[in-house]
Structure formats: C-alpha cells, structure tokens
Amino acid sequence: MDKNQPAEAHVLTRAQRHQKKKKKKTNKGRAWLIALCVLLVLGLGGYIFRKELMVLAFDTFLADTVKNTLDDSYQPIDQPGKGGGAEELTVAELTKEPFSVLLLGTDQREDEIARTDSIIYSVVRPADNKVLLVSIPRDSYVKMVGTPTIKGTRSETKINAAYAYGGAQMSVDTVEALLKHDVDYYATINFNGLTDVVNALGGVELPITEKIENKQADHEKFTIEPNKPIYDGTEALNYVRYREDSDFKRTERHRIFLKQMLDRMKSVENLTKIPELIGIAGQNFKTNMTSDFMLSLAKTVILSDSTPTISSHMLQGEGVSRDAWYYELDDEDLEETIDSISKWLDPNSTEADLVVDDTDAGGDSHTDQEGQPAGDVGQ
C-alpha cells in the first residue's frame, strides 16, 4: 500500500453505529438530568433559604447606604445605657429580651411648635415575633414630667403638650411616669413625610369598607372612597389623621396602618427601595436607636416567617371639661395596662400572659377573629 495515499476510512458496522448513537443519547440524557438536578437544588435551596438570601442581599447591597442615612436620624436623649449602645447588636442578641419603643407621630409644619398627634407605647418581643401597641389618647390629662424648654408650661395638661414643652425627652419622661415602665427607645415620625414614603412603596392596602369624609368646618376637607385595592400616600395620610369619629377608632387606624406598612415593606420587590425610603424620611424621622441596632432589628423581621403578630389596647377614660376639653384616664384600666406591660416585658411570660383586652369603653371589640385590628368602618 502506497504510504502517500490517504488511509481508507474505517467503516462501522450497523451494530457499532447503533452503539455509538445510543452512547450519545445517554450522555445527552445525563447532561439534562444533571442540569435538572442543579435547577432543583438551586430552586429548592432558594426557597428554603430565601430569608437568608434576602439578608445576604440586604447586607451586600443596602446596609452601608442605609447605615449612613440612619446615622443622620440619630438623636440621643438622657437615657444612660439605652438607645442601642455603642456596639453593633447581632440578630441572636436582639432576640433574647423584649424591649420598649415609644412611637411619637407629629404633624409639624415648617418651624411651628409640634405636638404629638399619635402616642404609642410599644413592646417588641423578637423571640416570639409579637408586638404590643398601647395607644395613649393625645388629650389624656396627665402630669408633665421633665424640664420644659419653653415658657408658659403647665404642670398638668394634655399629654401631647409634652413634646411641645420639651421635645422627645419630656415626652419620654412623662410617658415613663404615667405607665411606670422605662422607655428603652423612642422614634419621632413627622406624618408629613408619610405621603412620599407610601407612594414610593406603590401605595398601601387599607381595610376601608365605608366612605371616610371630613365634614367639620374647621377641618381640612377630604374624602376617602372605600374598597379600593390600594391607597396612595395622600389617602393614607388622611386615613391616619381622620378624627371625626372617636379617639378609639383613630388610634386603631394608626395601628392598622403600621401593620399594613410592615407587610408592604417586607415584600422582596420593596426590599431594594429601603435606601430610597430612608432618604425620603430624612428630617421627618428622629430616634435614639443606633443605625447598627435598627439594621439588626430589620434583619430579624426579614428572617421571621411572617409579619409580627400585633396586640393592641387604647387607654380608657372619658371626656371632661375644665378650662378645655380633656380625656380623663380610667385608673383601673391604667393599672391593668401597666400590669399587662410588665408581662410583655418579661421574657418568660406565657401565651396566656400576653392576652390583651382590646375592647373600647362600650365593650365593643375592635379585632377580627385572627386577633388583628378589624377593618375600618369610616363614619
């Protein structure tokens, strides 16, 4: 055979061709099987560890930006050993002990003296994902505690004047004296920043079943239509500020709004909006919680299986007329509320210890069968 001639092509038998084709199919099938397994593992892992992945994304892409903005909102008051401390708290450390937060909502405009439109003493129990909200009617007649920063203060008057007299410090001191429990942290929120925050979230769901309308001559006119799937920022602001029914319903609306906002912010699509939301809040938010503390707290919410279960109560009383109209607190209800707060702050309390009476002065309950605030009924 001439070495310069090309070698004759090797001719495969039918059996050899069949075996080679079968091998290709087997390799191709094995490749698809491996790819499918990888997808299943990634998908299942993503589902099982979705909360951990959200925390990883939060730490990687959001934490530094949010921290810098939150540092600007930090405003400590005279509370030794409180306010989050100098060291960063881990998620594990945060879930050990219940703590209290005083939520103060104002509607301050420009440089006017602000009074608190909403006063809520809350107890957070991270270990069992529960929150207690105790609403204090803004017209409650109480003793002012602390050093006033403006002249003309009164020793006893409406509790919402404490913020005007001495800012967050005097509000904290006055509430601590009233409820006989410490305030670990406070957060002051100007409702005027609420509109932009809600709009940035794409609106918020609100359980409004009847039209809500401001009719009184000295009130700003607005109407909120019922049964809408989503409400914008202006409607949400009007919802929390509406007060032509009762203090009980008004404070209930505050609690409903807080829960709905928590639900809205926990969605994956809104997680990336956190820096924008914090930026919008800007000067509308002041607190003695350090940025590290708040970031750790945010991660405990992300890692929880659901939005915290909220129990609520409004201090009971009746209207009285002196030199002005006041809300006279009921001594028996106040003492029962103080006892309930003690149990909520005790990490060893049982489920039975945490049951809260949510009825108003007329004995009507304002929670649904699942223990959450019932839908608003407007007027």
Image (tube, helix red, strand yellow):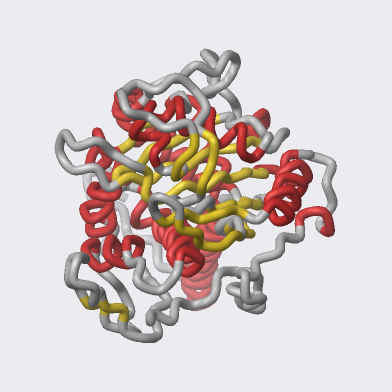
Q: Quadrant of residue 84?
A: top right
Q: Residue at x 63, y 59 (%)?
A: 311
**Residue farthest to the left?**
110
Q: Residue at x 60, y 51 (%)?
A: 304
Quick check: 225 above or below 133?
Answer: below
Question: Residue 195 appears at what percent x and percent y?
Answer: 23, 56
Question: Residue 39 appears at what percent x and percent y?
Answer: 50, 60
**Residue farthest to the front?**
323
Quick check: 158 above or below 19?
Answer: above
Q: How many circles with numbers are drawn on the protein?
A: 0
Asked whether 80 or 321 is in front, the reply is: 321
The C terminus appears in which quarter of the rendering?
Answer: bottom left
Q: Is residue 136 visible?
A: yes
Quick check: 211 above or below 238?
Answer: below
Asked whether 256 or 37 is in front, the reply is: 256
Q: Residue at x 55, y 37 (%)?
A: 175
Question: Residue 151 appears at what percent x and percent y?
Answer: 31, 24
Question: Residue 303 appears at what percent x and percent y?
Answer: 58, 47
Asked whether 245 or 351 is in front, the reply is: 245
Q: Quadrant of residue 81?
A: top right
Is 358 positioned to the left or the right of 109 in the image? right
Q: Quadrant of residue 142?
A: top right
Is 318 positioned to the left or the right of 63 in the image? right
Q: Is residue 37 visible?
A: no
